[in-house]
Image (cartoon, helix red, strand yellow):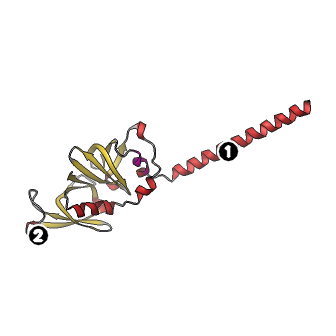
């Protein structure tokens, strides 16, 4: 009887030790997984929700998060849509109850800021562009989005882009751009 009790006790201790080992392994796997997450992966769970952005320029944008890509996001505020590049963001405030990471965040990572900017080129959207330091870089139509820059044709605000109306063309490196705004 004593031996049975002793063996039962040893077996329960062994099972408890194995359970602790599994718990430690799971915790370590979770830590490793979390270390792979990027800031923008956290934002994927916020799509459709309200967020607030503090920009390096001191400007604060609030609105509904529409899209999240590689180092960029789009935000809808009233009738204006903002394309915000990571280079200009100081901090992002999100709703606590929506702070989960979305499983398909890896798919969203594939949409580069160049691809997002090319969609504005394709739409011939009139945009206003601000630098990371808050300086207004100009308004006009995006002619081209390259691998690391955009080409902005400046023309009168009340008209469409026509060759005769273009006052100048400005090349803007992605690293200098914080926000592009266009009316939705």
**Residue underneath mark 2:** 163
The tag on residue 171 is none
Q: Position of residue 67 (x, y in %)?
A: 34, 51
- Residue 133 percent coordinates (x, y): 26, 53
Residue 53 belongs to the span the image colors magenta: no
Q: Earlier in the sequence, mark 1 or mark 2?
A: 1
Above or below 54: residue 169: below
Q: What numbered label is drawn on residue 22?
A: 1
Crowding at dot 1, Cα within 10 Å, few <14 / some 14-19 / many 20+, comes out as few
Query: CB atoms at circles 1 and 2 under 8 Å apart?
Result: no
Question: Looking at the image, which is closer to me, 135 or 81?
Answer: 81
- Real-space CA distance between mark 1 and mark 2, rounded to the nearest whole angstrom: 68 Å
- Residue 167: horizontal and vertical position, in percent? 10, 66
Q: Is residue 44 left or right of residue 142?
A: right
Question: How busy is the neighbourhood of tag 2: few (under 14 within 10 Å), some, or many (20 plus)?
Answer: few
> Which range is magenta?
41-45
SS of the residue at dot 1? Answer: helix
């Amino acid at each position: 009887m004593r031996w049975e009790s002793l063996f039962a006790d040893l077996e329960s201790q062994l099972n408890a030790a194995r359970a602790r080992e599994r718990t430690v392994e799971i915790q370590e796997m979770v830590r490793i997984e979390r270390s792979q997450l990027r800031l923008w992966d956290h934002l994927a769970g916020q799509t459709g929700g309200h967020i607030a952005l503090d920009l390096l320029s001191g400007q604060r944008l609030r609105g509904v998060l529409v899209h999240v890509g590689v180092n960029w996001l789009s935000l809808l505020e009233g009738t204006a849509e903002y394309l915000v590049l990571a280079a200009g963001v100081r901090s992002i405030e999100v709703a606590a109850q929506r702070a989960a990471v979305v499983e398909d965040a890896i798919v969203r990572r594939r949409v580069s800021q160049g691809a997002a900017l090319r969609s504005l080129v394709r739409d011939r959207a009139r945009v206003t562009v601000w630098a990371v330091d808050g300086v207004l870089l100009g308004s006009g139509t995006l002619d081209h989005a390259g691998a690391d820059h955009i080409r902005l044709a400046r023309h009168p605000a009340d008209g469409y882009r026509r060759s005769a109306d273009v006052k100048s063309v400005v090349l803007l490196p992605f690293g200098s751009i914080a926000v592009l705004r266009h009316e939705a």
